[in-house]
Image: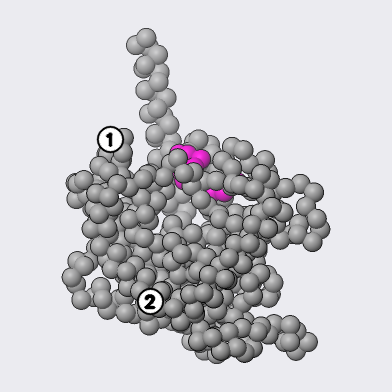
Amino acid sequence: MIGNQGKQWKSMCKGLVLGTLLTSCMILLYSLTAPPVQLNLQEIPVPYSCAYRPSHARGQHLNTSQSASGQGGSCTPKVDLMFMKTHKTASSTILNILFRFGEKHRLKFAFPDSRNDFFYPSPFQRTQVKDYRPGMCFNVICNHMRFNEPEILKLLPADTAYVTILRDPAELFESSFHYFGKVVPLTWKISAEDKVAEFLREPWRYYDPEGYNSFYLRNLLFFDFGYDNNLSPDDPRVQQSIQAIENRFHLVMMVEHFEESLILLKDTLCWDMEDLLFFKLNARKDSLVSKLTPDLRSQALEWNAIDWMLYRHFNLTFWRRVEAYGRERMARDVLELQRRNSEMAAICIEGGQPVEAGRIQDTSMQPWQPIGEKSILGYNLKKNIDKKHRKLCRKMLTPEIQYLTELGVNLWITKLWAHVREFLNW
């Protein structure tokens, strides 16, 4: 008995040492592949617009739409777009929409090189863009980054529309804690079964502002926008930063009102309803979502007070946009979007519902999973889909990492990390 326990401990120690070494190697690789900062980068102005529409196609891209005030008229779809991809905010679903729109209009994406983010959590630098040269025209940028407005302005054309999405900070905190907790050493010493509740009970016992990956556990939205997530909520810089976000972004969407957000996106960018079709991607199994009690929710909002201020501010602006659009008109359009999505689900999805990772039949459709578990759902593509819908169905169900690869992004670091995790059974 004692001999077996000794062997188990020895095996565990070997695994821990191996895991530590491999993780250190991956962090080193991430660091070494970061593009060098070019201090004397040549400044070449980006054109006012990077929209490209061949003369024979101009008429095909004119949409008949109503403005928010209800006035009819034709407009041209906007194709220069900056989507600020915040964490755990249904942003993978939005990326799928953007990827399909970009392919439809032959747009040029500003992608990262060798991985699926712009060297997050480092502030964005335009030199991080794959094949970047000063003065180049890019239509869309949408991968995870830590927002850095001066660098973005030097990359994208002046007519770019800026869009982002927020989520209730209590729900976001729970989701982030679950998804990223294992890469935040601060959480490793929490022994309680309900780690979220234990952390919120005494956050300063576990939290260190300078701790590795600590930003995932406090005011993550504010951090994503490039600001100090450890400021006091009373610090005047908080309100100044929220105002700066409002001044820059043309539309701030809300996860809790996702379909209404997409309708406002359509209105802002003059897109078609068919451009908004979506299936929910990167969703977690309901059984693994911690249901926050009223007390835990209150504690989570207090701990993420700056994100709560940010959310409440843009929740007000969101509903002002809905009022301007028209409540009845919004309700009609949401119903129409739901009808079309249900129609596509019946055409595309085997069983009509997402399934657990172990039941996904096509390995190429497996979503990226958090370390140590298989909690993210995916889909099985129906067999014998008619030719008209076959391509669209597959694209709508393709996870983010695989879609990036299809678009030509070399994700060798991301894929290498996936192989390491598979080897360690993480």
Instruction: Give the residue drawn at x 53%, y 70%.
Output: 331
Say whether residue 41 is left or right of residue 349. Answer: left
Say whether residue 328 is left or right of residue 305. Answer: right
Instruction: Give the residue drawn at x 44%, y 78%.
Output: 323
Of badges 1 and 2, the one in the foreground is: 2
Per the image, the residue denoted by label 2 is 317
Stretch in magenta: 366-375
Instruction: Give the residue drawn at x 49%, y 80%.
Output: 325
Say whether residue 303 is left or right of residue 347. Answer: left
Per the image, the residue denoted by label 1 is 191
Q: Quadrant of residue 215?
A: bottom left
Q: Residue furthest top?
A: 1
The answer for how far apart the CA atoms under marks 1 and 2 are is: 41 Å
Q: Earlier in the sequence, mark 1 or mark 2?
A: 1
| Position of the N terminus by quadrant | top left
State yes or no: residue 258 in magenta.
no
State yes or no: residue 372 in magenta.
yes
Q: Quadrant of residue 182?
A: top left
Residue 302, how many percent across, how many down? 23, 58
| Element type at mark 1 | loop
Decide if residue 142 is in sight here: no
Foreground residue among 336 and 90: 336
Q: What's the magenta bit mostly, secondary-structure-wise?
A: loop
- What is the tally of numbered marks visible in this picture? 2
| Element type at mark 2 | helix
Residue 263, how many percent across, how many down? 54, 72
Q: Quadrant of residue 267?
A: bottom right
